[in-house]
Every structure is written in C-alpha cells, then in structure tokens.
C-alpha cells in the first residue's frame, strides 16, 4: 500500500537517504530549511525511483516554523502514514562551563522542541493514516556522553524519553520509535568534526568503521514496517554503545 511520509531535514544526509529509501510507490514531503537546491534534487531522485515528492520549507526552531510546515502538509493531504523527525544538528561545539542560555535554547529548539511540536501537530493526520507511525532520530551522544557536544546529547536524550512517553500516549493508533545513529559521515560531521576526531571515533568503534546513511535509512524502514514495535530506540553505532 502506498504511503505518505513527511521527513524533516530531508535535503541531505540521513533524511535525504531515507526519502530515497522509501521512494518507490510512495509520496514524500521533503522538508528543508535552507538547502533548497539539495531538497529539489532529493525530490527528483524520489520521482526517478518510482515515487512522488514535493519540497516544503520551514525553520523548525520556532513554533511558527513548525506550524508553517504542518499547514503546507495539511493543505496537500488529509492523512499521513509516517512522520520521520530527522531535522536536528549540533549547532556548535562548546563545553559545559562556557555554554550560555541562548545556546541551550537554540540547541533544544532544533533537536527537541521541533520533534515535540511536529509530533503534536501531525497527530490528526496520522490518526487518519494506515498503520501510522513516527520515527525520531536521536544520537549515540545521548548514550556515551560527548565532550563539547554535551548539550546536544542532552537534547537527544530528551527525544529518547519523549519517544517512550508518546508511544504509550498514542497507542494503539500511532506507533512511536527512534533510531540512535553512531558516527555517520554526513554534512553534520563535515561541519563540526575534524578528520583526526573522525579517525579517533573509527578507532574506538569495535567494528572499526563508520556507518552509512543507508544503514540508518534501512533501520527506519524496519521500524515503519514492523507493527509490533513501539516505544523502542534502536542503536546503530558499530558497538560504540552496547547494552
């Protein structure tokens, strides 16, 4: 059965590959903030693979931006099957003894508040969908502690907790799960992590290599397709964190 998906932060990295992974036979809302050209290319690749897609722009660090995105989606469809809350970012590296209030607010707005608000807004559409589900993106940073990214890790830890609470509140109509990626070479790390730090991450990973965006996209697909999983966070990190 054809699905309608909204993927936030879908212009690059994990979000883009997830859109392409789900392309065949599905309709995808490719959300972006500033990378319009990249988002259009993702939509084109979705169409090339037998799906359909539209790009939607919004800054999800504000309530107004989240409502703008929801309004554009709701204007095009009366039902949604999948919401992938992928939009997020480190924003900046800084240590706990130097972090300021505005920085904390910026990081949590992007990584946590946007997830909560988009979930809340999309519930009516998801309740009209088929086997509806939400997949949130967290991070290995919430598991292991990440010096200079501690606030980012805390914001992702909040998403992890929110995932379980939302799964209980929205059951049985809507399943809610999460994926916690390890170190995945994407524009995220290109911007914030120097090559020597990436090599340190690789050496400390038991499997001795980084993951790929497609490995995360395939895990998201697994959660979407398995209707007996809810309230779970799947760690995909090559053994950086084990439990």
Image (tube, rainbow, N blue to C red):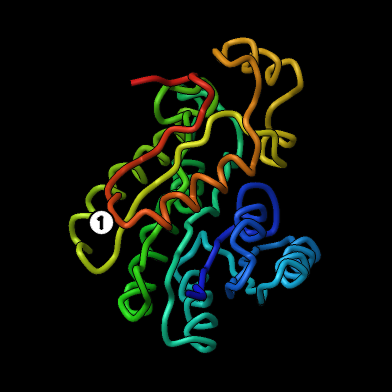
Q: Please tell me which residue is depicted at 43% across the width and 21% down the height of the picture.
A: 241
- 84 over 142 or under it: above or below: below
From the top left corner, tell me how far across and down residue 159 is, in percent: 36, 46
- 26 over 99 or under it: above or below: below
Residue highlighted by disc 1: 166
**Horizontal relation, residue 97 to residue 197: left or right:** left
For this rendering, which residue is in front, 95 or 190? 190
- 187 over 123 or under it: above or below: above
Q: Please tell me which residue is depicted at 54% across the width and 87% down the height of the picture.
A: 76
For this rendering, which residue is in front, 140 or 155? 140
Q: Please tell me which residue is depicted at 30% across the width and 76% down the height of the picture.
A: 127
From the top left corner, tell me how far across and down residue 212 is, in percent: 65, 36
From the top left corner, tell me how far across and down residue 181 is, in percent: 52, 35
**Horizontal relation, residue 83 to residue 201: left or right:** left
From the top left corner, tell me how far across and down residue 84 is, in percent: 48, 59
For this rendering, which residue is in front, 24 or 132? 24
Q: Please tell me which residue is depicted at 51% across the width and 49% down the height of the picture.
A: 106
**Horizontal relation, residue 26 to residue 128: left or right:** right
């Amino acid at each position: 059965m054809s699905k309608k998906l909204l993927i936030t932060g879908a212009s690059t990295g994990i979000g883009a590959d997830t859109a392409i992974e789900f392309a065949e036979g599905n309709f995808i809302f490719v959300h972006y903030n500033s990378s319009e050209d990249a988002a259009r290319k993702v939509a084109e690749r979705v169409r090339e693979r037998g799906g359909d897609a539209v790009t939607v722009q919004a800054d999800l660090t504000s309530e107004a931006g989240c409502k703008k995105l929801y309004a554009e989606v709701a204007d095009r469809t009366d039902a949604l099957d999948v919401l992938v809350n992928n939009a997020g970012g480190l924003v900046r590296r800084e240590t706990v003894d130097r972090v300021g209030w505005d920085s904390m607010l910026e990081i949590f707005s992007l990584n946590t508040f946007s997830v909560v608000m988009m979930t809340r807004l999309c519930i009516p559409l998801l309740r009209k969908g088929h086997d509806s589900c939400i997949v949130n993106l967290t991070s290995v940073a919430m598991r292991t502690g990440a010096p200079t990214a501690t606030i980012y890790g805390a914001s992702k830890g909040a998403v992890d907790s929110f995932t379980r609470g939302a799964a209980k509140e929205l059951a049985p109509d809507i399943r809610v799960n999460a994926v916690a990626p390890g170190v995945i070479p994407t524009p995220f790390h290109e911007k914030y992590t120097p090559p020597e730090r990436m090599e340190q991450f690789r050496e400390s990973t038991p499997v001795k290599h980084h993951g790929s965006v497609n490995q995360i996209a395939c895990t998201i697909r697994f959660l979407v397709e398995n209707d007996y999983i809810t309230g779970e966070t799947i760690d995909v990190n090559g053994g950086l964190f084990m439990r």
